[in-house]
Image (spheres, helix red, strand yellow):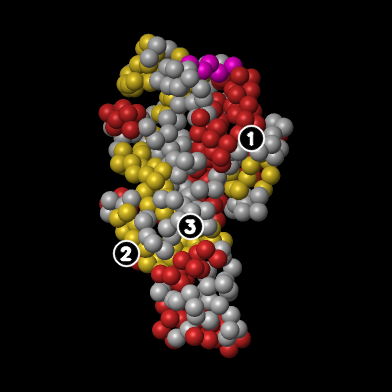
Amino acid sequence: MEKIAVIGGGAAGYFLAANLGKEIGKHTVIFEQSLLPLQKVRISGGGRCNVTHACFDPLDLVEYYPRGKKELLSVFYQFQPGDTMAWFEERKVELKIEDDNRIFPVSNSSLSIIDCLLKEVEKNKVKVNFSDGVKSIRKIEKGFELETSSGTYQFETVVVTTGSTPKFWKNLKSLGHKIISPVPSLFTFNCKDPRIEGLMGISFENAEIKMKSEKLENDGPLLITHWGFSGPAILRSSAWGAIALNEKGYKFDIQINFIQQTKEDVVDLLHNKKFDDPKKSIYKYNPFDFPKRFWISILQYCKISEQLVFADLSKKQIDLIAKELTEAEYAINGKSTFKDEFVTAGGVDLKEVNFQTMESKLIPNLFFAGEVLNIDAITGGFNFQACWSEAYIISNKLKDIY
């Protein structure tokens, strides 16, 4: 019987193997169903790899996780973003903190992260079986029996780092674990509306999104796309509302404040324009800090004549424009996958895992890390950080065992 099987060659699986050391590493096998490892790391951040986020207090860090907040607190007290940065930099991978606190390799290439992990895993003499997915897992007297594409193996310890894989969740269910049904977590909103038609590419620096039916509010950059809305504000809303929006079939209404001002502020501003710039054309002069195309679209939607100057604006027209900029209602009909960050809510029930060690409470020597668990975060490097932290904790536990 062999010692350790790691099922899944993604971020969590490789980071675990990279931290085992040679003595334990040479008794470890990674089973990866694809031809290449670390595929999600490769495409993350548009190919740059958003390694983690510059949030170094665990109490603040857990607030970015719609699911897993309570459980991850003890995890992040053991290994947090500062530790991740130190780990990679000790291995000659320079990292940088960008203005929005996302952390990337200085090279701006995910290959820097991949090459580092591959090198460490090789140094630890860990065996990697590519194109060798695990079809089933069975508990036996002194460990586990795995049936893979290449044959049947027996291991004392199994670490599951498969990501959000419905097929393997069935195997875990057969072992007795409860699986929370998966739903998409990070996605963009589909919206067909004349106010945003033909305006793809226009962005707003800090918009406010409200979903009144779910009492959800988020803010941040917003982008108009050819299918509707995207950007951090939307992705955050999709993460926090993942389960409720799935139950609605992704048909719901949102309220958008494009300019982070109150309706009253906008009314006052436009009233002042009537006196300060009475003869200026409303269509030619945009008093707000967003592209003119959007301003014109809103004026057309409000049925404001192109011939009007600011002095001509009625109280009703001013009120209508102010409402469209600060309290606009948009009907969402469907979602689209956010290409860089496909994440799901759902997975192994967190009540069944000991987060001091990441070991199953039901089955000794069975461990979990990464998206196989019912944990997910907003975009910004947080999902990777959970993988790094959980995997590091397991590596320490395995060093204690072996």
Using residue 162 as the reference point, say whether residue 110 is left or right of it: right
Which badge, 3 or 2, comes first in the chain's sequence?
Answer: 3
Mark 1 residue type? Ser
Answer yes or no: is residue 234 visible. no
Image quadrant where residue 164 sits: top left
Mark sitting earlier along the chain (1/3) = 1
Kind of residue sitting beneath label 3? Leu
Image depth: mark 3 or mark 2 in front: 3
- Separation (CA) of disc 1 from disc 2: 41 Å
Q: CA distance from mark 1 to mark 3?
A: 31 Å
Disc with the residue nearer the chain's start (1 vs 2): 1
Q: Residue at x 29, y 30 (%)?
A: 170
Q: Is residue 252 visible?
A: yes
Disc sitting over residue 206 in the figure: none
Residues at badges 1 and 2 in contact (C-beta under 8 Å)?
no
Secondary structure category for the residue under label 2: helix
Image location of residue 87, percent across then percent down = 65, 36
Q: Secondary structure at mark 3?
A: loop
Residue 90, by quadrant, is top right
Residue at 50% from the left image edge and 34% from the top image edge: 40
The residue under label 1 is 109
The part of the chain drawn in magenta is 124-129
Give the camera-side residue of 312 and 100. Answer: 312
Q: What residue sits right under mark 3 in the picture? A: 199
User: Residue 53, image x and y in percent?
Assistant: 59, 48
Vertical relation: 394 (above or below) 284:
above
Residue furthest to the top in view is 151
Look at the image and say whether residue 337 sits in the magenta stretch. Answer: no
Q: Which mark is residue 213?
A: 2
**Rendered view: 74 above or below 167:** below
**279 or 95, nearer to the observer:** 279
